[in-house]
Image: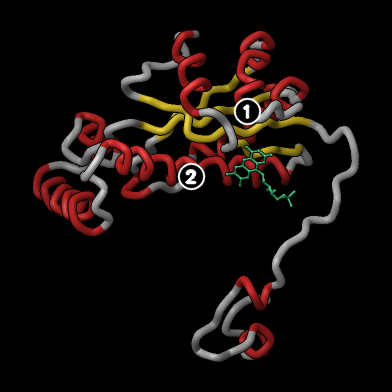
Amino acid sequence: MPAEDVNYILEPGRLSPSLVGSEPWQFLVLQNADLRQKLKPYCWGIPTMETSSHIVAVLAKKNARCDSDYFADIMVRRGLEGEAKDKAMAIYKKFQEEDIAILESERSLYDWAGKQTCIALAGMMAGTAVIGVDSFPIEGFSYKEVNQISADEGLFDPAEWEVSVMATFGYRAKEIRLKPRKPVEETVQRPNGLCAQTLCKNKTVRP
Ligand SMILES: Cc1cc2nc3c(=O)[nH]c(=O)nc-3n(C[C@H](O)[C@H](O)[C@H](O)COP(=O)(O)O)c2cc1C
């Protein structure tokens, strides 16, 4: 894949929304063949770990507590200061402490960051589809080994970051099957009783 396509894919990830603009992610673009080969056995042996053009490993921020330096930087980036900053901080604190209650353990805090990384990943995958490049999301990997290998390579500071999810990107080598999916009636529930067709006819929602 040419560099401009890779940049095109990364951009919707970078621009992804995240809770309170926390952007608890970093994207590692992996092209090194040796490293990819080393990681492959710990990723269910997925062939595209070797054959794809690029792999993006999405790192999730560890310990993204609202009272951390990491959050202080976010406030600056978002132009929050003085009273506005105090107000925002009170909301974030209540959110992390009570609403979603993720300050109970490092793990729950990390999982929260990991949840945000999937939004960034989805953005990249959608961007990829627009330019006719395929993607393959990877969450089925041994977290311990993948993180150990990556950290040993000096790719990131394991005290601060952990690989949350990955995706391989490249051109399709063979045709793909039609995607089996649950029907829309099973997936979308409308408790107000209006069916999709009625809503469309009334122009309440776009078809
Ligand atoms: C976040 C995420 C992680 C995934 N991780 C893996 C994975 O590690 N290995 C794998 O074979 N498929 C993985 N998949 C692909 C799903 O298994 C796949 O989408 C599902 O089997 C349905 O296949 P289809 O989308 O081709 O219909 C992942 C999908 C998502 C959304």
Q: Which residue is mark 2?
A: 16
Q: Report the residue at 49% width, 36% height from top.
A: 14
Q: Report the residue at 61% width, 36% height from top.
A: 138
Q: Pick the quarter of the image with the C terminus.
A: bottom right
Q: Is residue 156 above or below residue 142?
A: above
Crowd around label 1: few <14 · some 14–19 · many ≥20 (10 Å): some
Q: Nearer the viewer, mark 1 or mark 2?
A: 1
How far apart marks 1 and 2 lie (CA) works out to 26 Å
Residue 66 lies in quadrant = top left
Q: Residue 22 at what x, y percent from top left?
A: 33, 41
Q: Which residue is mark 1?
A: 43
Q: Residue 191 at what x, y percent from top left?
A: 50, 85
Q: Report the residue at 65% width, 47% height from top.
A: 126
Is ligand 1 less than 8 Å from the beta carbon at label 1?
Answer: yes
The answer to whether residue 86 is seen in the rendering is yes
Q: Element at badge 2?
A: loop
Q: Residue 18 at what x, y percent from top left?
A: 40, 47
Residue closest to the eye, 110 or 5:
110
Q: Pick the quarter of the image with the N terminus.
A: top right
Q: Is residue 53 above or below residue 11?
A: above
Q: Report the residue at 64% width, 26% height from top.
A: 55
- Of callouts 1 and 2, which one flags the residue occurring earlier in the amino acid sequence? 2
Residue type for callout 1: Cys
Q: Is residue 32 above or below residue 69?
A: above
Residue type for callout 2: Ser
Find out whether the residues at labels 1 and 2 contact each other: C-beta distance under 8 Å.
no
Residue closest to the eye, 19 or 65:
65
Residue 132 lies in quadrant = top right
